[in-house]
Amino acid sequence: MRAFAYQRTTEVRDALSLVAEHDGARFLAGGTNLVDLMKAGVESPARLVDIRSLALGEISETPEGGLVLGATVTNSAVAADPRVRRRYPALSQAILAGASGQLRNMATVGGNLLQRTRCSYFADPSEACNKRVPGSGCSALNGAHHNHAVLDWTQHCVATHPSDMAVPLAAFDAVVRYETLDGTAEVPLSEFYLPVGDRPDLETVLPDGALITAVVLPAAKVAVTSRYRKVRERASYAFATVSVAAALDIQDGLVQDVRLALGGVASRPWRARLAESALRGGPFTAERISAAADLELAVAQPLRDNGYKVTLARNLIEAVLSDLVADMGEGPSR
Ligand code: SF4
């Protein structure tokens, strides 16, 4: 057992100062991932700075009609918020598809974005893992990797990002707001996660000691008609094998706007921009949906045991888009 210090703060600046002043200090919010990793010996912070008393627990409106999700709002509160359910239904659905009720009651917006991969080798200190110990190797590359990445991996790490919530956030162009001792900054979620490269231990662009304070959801008419669908190995309390967040706006038979993002396929939520571009501006036909999905997945590089994910992702894109169009009372032209 390793001893650690614990402090609770009520001011953002105090929390930032405490982490800056103490080597090995970490912020603690819901603790649903960090505490598990401490028990497994993967994380060993010298000090935990509890941020749950900071004034970051509200959901508020932006002047343009978007929403600001405070960093310590619980996942359950986001999923249940009537504004989220009405304007960004895929976000509510994604959160409810993740974890369990008890975990969602504790887990927070900021913590959800920063949760670590559920690659089993990462959680086992006896295994080689470049994400846990840089330069030690990757046990998953030739090991049990049927649920690992098919896009954008390198030989240094083939893990996936586990968040459901981050998938619709990627589709909706969410922005991560954070605070450092130098002030406030923002970064689009599309630039928040680093590509794997040769340092999979470096996961985000957050500066050392920075605190996520909110996630900003821009107003998006297309998001009103959105869905999240997740395929997993059991009916609940399982991470995505593949998931899709999609939003669609069709006017006069033509796709005005479409948003697509995939989960469970890469080290970060995967915005399917190639498929979006292929669909935007044209008629919504079954052939065009298939061609768009194929285009997006043409760059997939399955590992020895996870080629099924490419087929699954393709079929899921088709299914979710077709469901959305059925919701709108239209159907793909044939
Ligand atoms: Fe570690 Fe990544 Fe390899 Fe898993 S896939 S063992 S997290 S380096």
Image (spheres, rainbow, N blue to C red):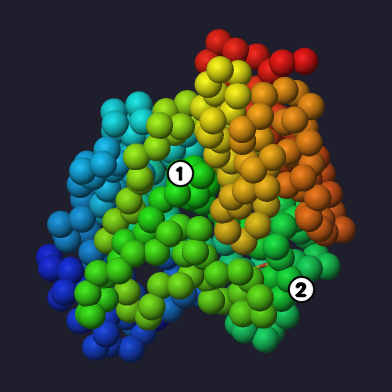
Tag 2's secondary structure?
loop
Horizontal side, residue 38 vs residue 261: left or right: left
Instruction: Residue at 71%, 76% (x, y): give it.
Output: 156
**Closer to the observer: label 1 or label 2?**
1
Quarter of the image with the C terminus is top right
- Give the quarter the ligand 1 occupies: bottom right
- Report the amino acid beneath label 1: Phe
Q: Quadrant of residue 196?
A: bottom right
- Residue at image position (27%, 38%) is 65
Q: Is residue 17 above or below residue 280?
A: below
> Is 284 positioned to the left or the right of 12 in the image?
right
Question: Exactly how many numbered labels are in the figure?
Answer: 2
Report which residue position mark 1 lands on: 172
Nearest the viewer among 99 and 91 is 91
Position of residue 109 measured from the top left corner of the image (x, y, whole percent) = 35, 52
Spatial CA span between label 1 and label 2: 30 Å
Q: Residue 39 at what x, y percent from top left? A: 46, 68
Q: Nearer the viewer, residue 143 or 153?
A: 153
Who comes first in sequence, dot 1 or dot 2? 2
In the image, what residue type sits under mark 2?
Answer: Gln
Local crowd size for mark 1, using a 10 Å CA cut-off: few (<14), some (14–19), many (≥20): many
Question: Which residue does the numbered mark 2 point to in the structure image?
Answer: 155
Residue at x-position 45% and y-position 72%:
205
201 displayed left or right of 214: right
Q: Quadrant of the N terminus?
A: bottom left
Image vertical order of residue 260 relative to residue 265, above or below? above
